[in-house]
Image (tube, rainbow, N blue to C red):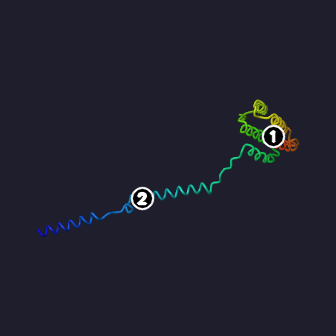
Amino acid sequence: MEMDCMNMDALQQLYDIYDIHYVPVWKRTWFIILAGCLIVSVVVVLGVLCYRKFWIQKKVVLSPLEQFEKALSNVHNFYGRPDQFYMHITTLLKDLFSSLYGLYLVDATDQQLIERLRSSEKVKKTVIDVVIKVLENVQQVKFGGKQVERLQLETVHKQLTKLLQKL
């Protein structure tokens, strides 16, 4: 019986050891994996935020008039290319009036452009007069050849600058 009592004590001590033995949560495998994923996620999110804030250039949104002025400064690049000059100027005018007055001018001819500007109550008569002069001069550049182009290019540029002042 004494032997049974010793075995019971040893058994009780063994249970006591295992009962007391405890693996903390931070040492368990699932916790280590979860913490690693969380740390990696935080580092990735912080990296993306820093990249967006410091390395990506913010786009500057220009007003329609500023866009027109910027495109107008490129007019001199069209020496010797009357067709492209004509297309550039008419596209500039259509884009400008489309964005300023909400008119649909994408597929409009020169005559339709003038008619739509006249039918709009928002557009001043002085602006329409300048547009008519610009379109006449641009057509002369397109169909007139090299000599007319050199003379008219400066005239068109001055008229477009005048148009900007009237808007």
**Which circle marks residue 166 in the picture?**
1
Label 1 or label 2, whichever lies nearer to me, is: 1
Looking at the image, which residue is at 12% across and 70% down? 2
Identify the image quadrant of residue 22. bottom left
Looking at the image, which residue is at 66% across and 50% down? 59
Identify the image quadrant of residue 16. bottom left
Q: Where in the figure is residue 122, as x and y percent of width and height? A: 75, 34
**Which circle marks residue 131 in the picture?**
none
| Amino acid type shown at disc 2 | Ile
- Looking at the rendered image, the quarter that the N terminus falls into is bottom left
Q: Where in the figure is residue 62, as x and y percent of width and height? A: 71, 46
63 w.r.t. 27: above or below: above
Q: How many numbered badges does the structure rendering display?
A: 2
Looking at the image, which residue is at 74% across and 45% down? 67
Label 2: few (<14), some (14–19) or many (≥20) C-alpha neighbours in 10 Å? few
| Amino acid type shown at disc 1 | Lys
Residue wearing tag 2:
33
Label 2 sits on a secondary structure element that is helix
Label 1: few (<14), some (14–19) or many (≥20) C-alpha neighbours in 10 Å? few
